[in-house]
Image (cartoon, helix red, strand yellow):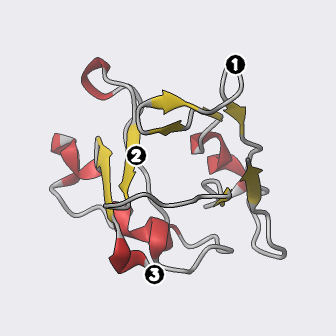
Amino acid sequence: DASDFDLAADPPDLNVLDDTGGEDDRTLDKLLNGRNVTTDDVDMWLAPLDWEGRTNVVKIDFGSATRVSGLRLWNYNKSLEDTYRGVRCLRILADGKEVSPTGGHLVPKAPGVDAFDFSHLIER
């Protein structure tokens, strides 16, 4: 249940950019809205890459010791032309200790269509 933990990101979304006027719908809450197999970007999260020279970070705080056996990802999938916007490689840290392989996890691009479930599962 998404209410059982805190979710944060830095930068949080495109609304940190001056030219969005704070009205871009692709906000962090979309990571948990349950609408994953889609090409509708209103159901996706998007944040600027290397904003102000910072590395993009998503943090999940479960508030207490929690066993996590996997992470299922749906990469950015608005259209075939926009699939380059998705994550390419990610590192996972648990309690500050890296649990990813050397170089991180490579995440496949989304297909740019919503005809099938294109999720990517990272398991421990």
Instruction: Say which label, 3 or 2, has the lower sequence index.
Output: 3
**In what element is the residue under mark 3?**
loop
Tell me if residue 64 comes above or below residue 47 in the rendering: below
Q: Which mark is residue 81?
A: none
Reading the image, the residue beneath label 3 is 1
State the residue at coordinates (30%, 28%): 51
Q: CA distance from mark 3 to mark 2?
A: 18 Å
- Please, what is the three-letter code of the amino acid marked with disc 1? Thr
Q: CA distance from mark 3 to mark 1?
A: 31 Å
Q: Which mark is residue 58?
A: 2
Reading the image, the residue beneath label 1 is 102
- From the image, state whether disc 1 or disc 2 is nearer to you: 1
State the residue at coordinates (37%, 38%): 48
Q: Position of residue 31 (x, y in %)?
A: 47, 65
Instruction: Say which label, 1 or 2, has the lower sequence index.
Output: 2
| Mark 2 crowd level (few <14, some 14–19, many ≥20, 10 Å Cα) | few
Tell me if residue 84 comes above or below residue 46 in the rendering: above
Q: Report if residue 13 is visible in the image.
A: no
12 horizontally vs 74: left or right: left
Q: For residue 38, which quarter of the picture?
A: bottom right
State the residue at coordinates (64%, 40%): 84
91 horizontally vs 12: left or right: right
- From the image, state whether disc 3 or disc 2 is nearer to you: 3
- Please, what is the three-letter code of the amino acid marked with disc 3? Asp
Q: Position of residue 82 (x, y in %)?
A: 62, 49
Cβ atoms under marks 3 and 1 closer than 8 Å: no
